[in-house]
Amino acid sequence: MNYKTVACNGCLHVALATMPHVESVCAGLWLAVGSRHERATLSGISHFVEHLLFKGTRKRTARQISREIEGVGGYLDGFTGEEMTCCYAAAGAKHAELLLDVLFDMVDNPTFPADEIEKERGVILEEIKMYEDQPAQRAQELLNSLLWPDHPLGRPITGFPETVAQIGRKDLVAHWKKYYAQGRLYVVVAGNIDPGKVVDFVLKRASSRRKPVRRSYPVFRDRRSKPGVACLTKPVEQTHLAIGLRGVSRHDPRRLAVKLASVILGENMSSRLFQILREEHGLAYSISSGTCHFADTGALTILAGVETDRALEALQLILRVVASLGRKSPSSAELRRAKEYVIGQLYLGLESTINQMLWVGESLVGYGSVWTPAEYEKAIEAVGPEAVQNVCRYLASDRRLCVAVVGPEPPVEPIQAVASFRP
């Protein structure tokens, strides 16, 4: 695997992952904009703009955009996150320039047709309803509002029905001009490519982009002094628990210890939570953990769907398992398994051109440079058992704990469990 990066006048960064053993290519255009850059009254506008990038340019209609990519056996997609947006396409290796031409056209020349805006507004409102009908998703969104209260990170990326309903064309165009037309652009291409040809094409295609204006966003300040709890009653068959430990940013060196703690706790079948809650107690079919890291904050989260009558038992058990990792460091064997899992999953994923594009893009936008898999592996290997224990002790303090509960009955007992939690 060979990685190459090129910077141009502060407005353009190009990163290439050359994979000579494959016959395909994936290209992605990234921008450092997401839901945390939005005012409350315009919540969901970044996601709205991303949808509309696919709805026509000065050169191509929406149908032509999809036909050009699908007509060579490829596909096209995009996503909006809290701090990043990406539009990407994949196809056979010989079509790299076509993919880039279409993606540049979408990002640089959208027309925001009034009729498409109204149709896409309806699509997004249905997307929000879809998530509303998914109790695990609602628990996660409720948890986010507790972890980052009164802050854009605590709001759903899709926005709310009331904000999406009132976002107008002028708002959309202004947001695009501010963050997309004038934003720093990150171009990532992974696959069987000729690096020189790709760089030349990108530099020529992006020659008109101006140096971006520096954009700011509201910094998160942790002012909570006690656990946060929220409950939502819905007519569902089980109770969904979302437990969050507000943690460290992506720039904090402890983030790797947080990742290993998450693996030990609940990222696979041999994890502590899976073995204890599912295998030993039969409390849950689904139990998992994960991490997220932003520029100035982050979290370790645990999600579980449990029988309503045993929700209190499950929550208490989860909290005890988390606290135990802060009281006693993992054994060398358990930590070794966690490290091998993280490293193995990374390399398995990076066999795909799409995952390579995502890995490089997230690294480039988040850190300003490409973190190679070998560098990541070396950093993971350097984490000791005490580091995992210490970061768990730090995360498991009661003021960092947040619990969201979605279930068929008013769940009073989980509130009592959290209130009495002592790490």
Image: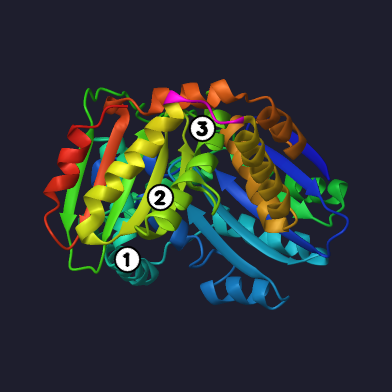
- Mark 1 element type: helix
| Upstream in sequence: badge 2 or badge 3 | 2
Label 2 sits on residue: 46
Q: Residues within 10 Å of mark 1 (few under 14, many from 20)?
A: many
- Residue at 78 percent across and 47 percent down: it is 17
- Please state which amino acid type lies under the numbered disc 3: Val
Q: Residue 161: horizontal and vertical position, in percent?
A: 23, 59
- Please state which amino acid type lies under the numbered disc 2: Ser
Mark number, residue 121: 1
Q: Are marks 2 and 3 in contact (CB under 8 Å)?
A: no
Bounds of the magenta segment: 327-331
Was residue 329 drawn as part of the magenta stretch in this picture?
yes
Position of residue 311 relative to residue 307, above or below, is: above
- Residue at 68 percent across and 38 percent down: it is 13
Q: Residue 288: horizontal and vertical position, in percent?
A: 45, 51
Give the CA separation, mark 1 to mark 3: 38 Å
Mark number, residue 258: 3
**Helix, strand or loop for the magenta stretch, by majority:** loop
